[in-house]
């Protein structure tokens, strides 16, 4: 055990909210497959190079750890948290069952549907910004816009009332805990969220609407109730937590050096590439994605034995100098931009078209309505969210 204790603790700490830990660049150049200790105390192999992370995430043999694997636990609880939990296992993780599940959900995230959502997202963003302006500066952009907008969008899509958003947020934060909440609190949140979603599934059976949950319930080949509940919870967590954090971090990155904001004001056609660059350059993305290796595999010249848990740091890989020219610089015109913010392969983020749409629309509306937007505190005063598997800022004080 002492050997594991001597390993570096992952995720690494960073003093600056928008800057990467120094270890990323060091590991990419000297030790691209590094042994690290997770919050649970378990050992994992950390991958930090773009090619290696993409290789493992794209390999159909390897999926998220299940409770049946002898995998490293992510969180400091006995069961290892949400990514090692039984709830995650309810959704099929491989083979034809996984493809069928993805196809059923993926129909709701097509380009056509996303374009149809744009006017509604823009109207909600305008309303939230107007309310923020009415209350006066300085304001917390995360609480005023970054958090409520994605919650409203995903709740509308699922047919769930968004007035329960504070409850969703509490359940999500608790279930996404790495070190912040106790195992009892995490279990309670999972059970409460499960009962809440079970009630909505039952209600959709009785009175289906035009939403995603109703479509899944009334499908000719419906999912089991357990899968429906886990899917609803997964979409609600993923649909608001990561996007809310990313809206906040994106705006912070663009205002950190205000010449970036000025460049977008001068040429709003850069919004799409600016969003992709913010996704790539996110230094506070969270723990990354774990994959359980069911057979021996060679990565970057290192043989990883069967039974290894590989931690894929997409955020570190997105700064790989071998893949991106001037990788540590923010280039609002960067194209192509082959970042891995949404993962890769069969398990790439299903909701990425929605996340992109929300980020683009929010940025367009902010540039239009608040061209004078600026940080209300020095960038070094921004604080990271601590103790969760997803990264974010505690708040984003702004003025205009």
Image: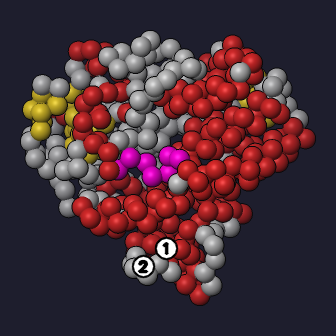
Residue placed furthest toward the bottom: 206
Which quarter of the figure has residue 133?
top right
Residue 349 lies in magenta, yes or no?
A: yes
Disc 1 from disc 2: Cα separation? 6 Å
Relative image position of residue 331 (x, y in whole percent):
54, 17
Which residue is label 2 attached to?
A: 222
Q: Which quadrant of the rendered structure holds the N terminus?
A: top left
Earlier in the chain: of badge 1 and badge 2, it is: 1
Q: Which quadrant of the rendered structure holds the C terminus?
A: top right
Picture disc at residue 201 = none
Q: Residue at x 29, y 52 (%)?
A: 64
* Mark 2 neighbour class, 10 Å CA radius: few under 14, some 14 to 19, many 20 or more: few
Which residue is label 1 attached to?
A: 216
Visible residue check, residue 232: yes
Q: Residue at x 40, y 26 (%)?
A: 318
Relative image position of residue 47 (x, y in whole percent):
27, 31
Helix, strand or loop status at disc 1: helix
Q: Residue at x 64, y 38 (%)?
A: 360
Residue 137 lies in magenta, yes or no?
A: no
Q: Residue at x 85, y 45 (%)?
A: 131
Relative image position of residue 41 (x, y in whole percent):
27, 41
Disc tally is 2
Visible residue check, residue 394: no
Residues at circles 1 and 2 in contact by the CB criterion of under 8 Å: yes
Which residue is nearer to you in this view: 211 or 396?
A: 211
* Mark 1 neighbour class, 10 Å CA radius: few under 14, some 14 to 19, many 20 or more: many
Q: Which residues are magenta?
A: 347-353
């Amino acid at each position: 055990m002492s050997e594991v204790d001597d390993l570096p603790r992952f995720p690494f700490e960073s003093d600056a909210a928008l800057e990467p830990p120094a270890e990323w660049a060091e590991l990419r150049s000297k030790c691209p497959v590094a042994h690290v200790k997770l919050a649970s105390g378990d050992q994992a192999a950390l991958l930090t190079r773009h090619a290696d992370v993409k290789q493992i995430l794209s390999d159909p043999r390897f999926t998220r750890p299940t409770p049946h694997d002898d995998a490293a636990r992510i969180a400091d609880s006995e069961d290892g948290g949400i990514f090692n939990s039984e709830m995650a296992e309810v959704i099929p993780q491989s083979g034809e069952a996984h493809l069928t599940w993805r196809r059923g959900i993926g129909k709701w995230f097509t380009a056509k549907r996303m374009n149809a959502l744009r006017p509604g997202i823009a109207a909600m963003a305008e309303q939230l910004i107007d309310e923020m302006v009415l209350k006066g500066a300085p304001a917390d952009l995360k609480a005023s816009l970054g958090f409520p907008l994605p919650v409203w969008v995903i709740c509308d899509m699922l047919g769930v009332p968004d007035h329960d958003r504070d409850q969703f947020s509490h359940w999500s934060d608790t279930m996404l805990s790495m070190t912040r909440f106790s195992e009892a609190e995490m279990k309670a949140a999972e059970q409460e969220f499960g009962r809440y979603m079970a009630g909505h599934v039952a209600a959709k059976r009785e009175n289906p609407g035009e939403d995603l949950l109703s479509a899944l319930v009334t499908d000719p080949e419906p999912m089991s109730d357990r899968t429906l509940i886990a899917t609803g919870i997964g979409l609600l967590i993923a649909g608001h937590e990561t996007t809310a954090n990313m809206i906040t971090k994106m705006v912070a990155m663009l205002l950190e050096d205000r010449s970036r904001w000025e460049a977008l004001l001068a040429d709003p056609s850069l919004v799409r590439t600016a969003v992709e660059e913010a996704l790539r350059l996110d230094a506070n993305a969270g723990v990354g994605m774990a994959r359980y290796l069911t057979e021996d595999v060679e990565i970057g010249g290192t043989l990883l034995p069967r039974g290894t848990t590989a931690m894929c740091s997409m955020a570190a890989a997105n700064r790989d100098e071998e893949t991106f020219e001037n990788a540590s610089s923010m280039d609002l015109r960067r194209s192509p931009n082959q970042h891995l913010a949404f993962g890769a392969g069969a398990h790439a983020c299903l909701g990425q078209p929605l996340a992109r749409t929300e980020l683009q629309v929010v940025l367009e509306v902010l540039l239009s309505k608040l061209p004078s937007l600026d940080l209300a505190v020095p960038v070094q005063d921004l604080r990271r969210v601590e103790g969760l598997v997803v990264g974010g800022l505690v708040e984003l004080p702004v003025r205009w």
